[in-house]
Image (spheres, rainbow, N blue to C red):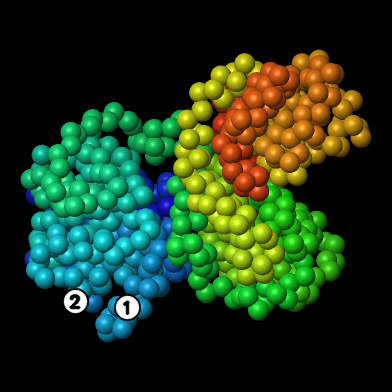
Amino acid sequence: MCGIVGFTGTTPAAGFLLDGLEKLEYRGYDSAGIAVAENGRFQIEKTVERIKNLQNKTNDGGTVPGNIGIGHTRWATHGVPSIANAHPHVSGNEKFAVVHNGIIENYMALREELIADGVCFASETDTEVIPHLLAKYDNGDFFEAVAKTVERLEGSYALGILCSDAPDTLIAVRKFSPLIIGLSENANFIASDVTALVSHTKDILYIEDGEIAVLTPSGVSLYDKNKNEISRATSVINWDVEAAEKGGFNHFMMKEINEQPNAVRQTIESRLHGRDIVFEDMKLDEEKLKTIRRIDIIACGSAYHAGMVGKYVFEELLRIPTNVDLASEYRYRNPITDEHTLTIIISQSGETADTLAALKEAKARGSHVLSIVNVVGSSIAKASDDVLYTWAGPEIAVATTKGYSTQLSVLYLLAIWGARLLHSADEQRLEDIFDDLCRLPELMEQLLQNEEQIRLLAKRCGDPSSLFFIGRNIDYAVSLEASLKLKEISYIHSEAYAAGELKHGTISLIEQGRIVLALACNEDLFEKLLSNVKEVKARGAYVIACATEGHTEIAKEAEEVLYIPKVDPLLSASLEVIPFQIYAYYVALYKGCDIDKPRNLAKSVTVE
Ligand code: F6R
């Protein structure tokens, strides 16, 4: 996820900028840059290597003097990692320099408008429209140019902006992307998070969505979206750098669990034009879609589990037969595929060796390959016919959470988009599902409020030797993911079972006190699942159920019930998985496990 820093003070800026960017390295990045202004001129330095390289290039900031500047670490979204795409970006007249974190959703329309005005673009980024808009609206008043520019922006942004005519003024704006202000006697700062600030100041001013902050060396003025000046008390933080990196959470995994609503919001909203779902530059168009007779989803681990959910959603909405395959199996099976098969590859890292090999097998046999990937410019992204990125930002914890959730979001978007074109589902239901999809981030936020209930549950359950997750259809697909989350970080054996399969063998393992986590969010199969719960109860199981709000009858059978808000059952996976991510986290925490780096596991599995 991109990182931003900015400085205006009575001493040189570069030292803070380079140090701040180094502190933000943990957020993940593929390129970086700084702009320092002196005597009304910007000096810009960029790198596609590490921050160390910027330090070397500038002789630790010595070659870029000036008391005001901005800096950026880029996690590529629009456009590959390159010097041209690295921030800061400047206007054609070199009057404005900008760093940006977030996604400008309407950048294509803005870019076309600016090109029609005669603007030349130097990068492929969505960000570059911003300095050009600033130049367009410039009438000599820096603040007004910023206010007019942000009115035109849709999407998410945290911005640090410099104007060569305003030699000591740094303007910051924020909407749905993180940004904070640091205050000190002789300088004021902006940063994406406190990590970059803690060694310089403990006095923080929080800037809210839609607000504009004007920083000079002597003070900070804050304005609401109507340009009225507002006052806000500063806060004092006492975090050390390690705590700051994790945003105050004890582990990256918990931080990332909490980032899910925003990651999902970003992934969904960046594809919406009103109620239309638009996948820019996708080669898979209506004509091609109509030739597709089968969908093969191929992935590993959690990405495979996301694919399992996708199967149910695609078959229900598109009415196209859908297979889900483990990449390591598919690649060695001499698979049967052709141009009438759509192959969907899912991978957070975009580098998983088996998944990449499976992709190549499918492509070599003529299938159209569409990948759902988090890392821009990754090997899988490059090898695919089409790529739909999940805008989750870098995932640091080995156990995926926001990666999985954003993969689900892309699958839902694809299914609704396709079903609208194919008229393969009831129109009203599709629109209801679309409405529920847009509500998911808010409902996820609500669910995260239940952390304490789940923590206590995990504490009560202790350290069982083995446990079971059961569910049917999508609940079964989520069971697989819930079980994997638990076993990979807590080292407790767990198994996910299709609830209807229990009686074909596994039920012999159910004995007194065995914990069974029963996922019962599929309304149509609720009664069936309830019968399975009775079966395991009769054999002594301790049942923890997850059901949709209102289904209180399950409380008569289960010892504990976790409720999720009601949405169309096809979307329930996105909500249902959250309590189990938190459950796995706390079980592992109470066992003293290394949550972010579980034994024997790697974040990116680039070997077979
Ligand atoms: C589990 C987990 C793994 C990955 C799998 C595929 O929490 O993260 O199971 O899902 O290794 O990785 P990607 O998605 O990078 O291809």
Residue 271, image x, y percentages:
49, 62
Q: Nearer the viewer, residue 287 or 78?
A: 287
- Indicate the amino acid at tag 1: Glu
Q: 24 left or right of 36? A: right
Query: Where 70 sits versus 367, above or below?
Result: above
For disc 2, the marked residue is 93
Distance between mark 1 and mark 2 Cα atoms: 18 Å
Residue 361 visible within the image:
no
Residue 122 quadrant = bottom left
For image coordinates 54% across by 49% down, the residue present is 436
Query: Where 288 sits versus 240, above or below?
Result: below
The residue lying furthest to the front in this view is 428
For image coordinates 74% across by 26% down, the residue present is 516
Residue 380, image x, y percentages:
62, 64
Please state which of the two labelled residues, at mark 1 or mark 2, is closer to the viewer. Answer: 1
Q: Residues within 10 Å of mark 1 (few under 14, many from 20)?
A: some
For disc 1, the marked residue is 113
Q: Nearer the viewer, residue 223 or 88?
A: 223
Residue 460, image x, y percentages:
62, 16
Q: Looking at the image, tell me whether mark 1 or mark 2 is earlier in sequence order.
A: 2
Query: Where 516 sits versus 57, above or below?
Result: above
Q: Residues within 10 Å of mark 2 (few under 14, many from 20)?
A: few
For image coordinates 43% across by 58% down, the residue present is 75
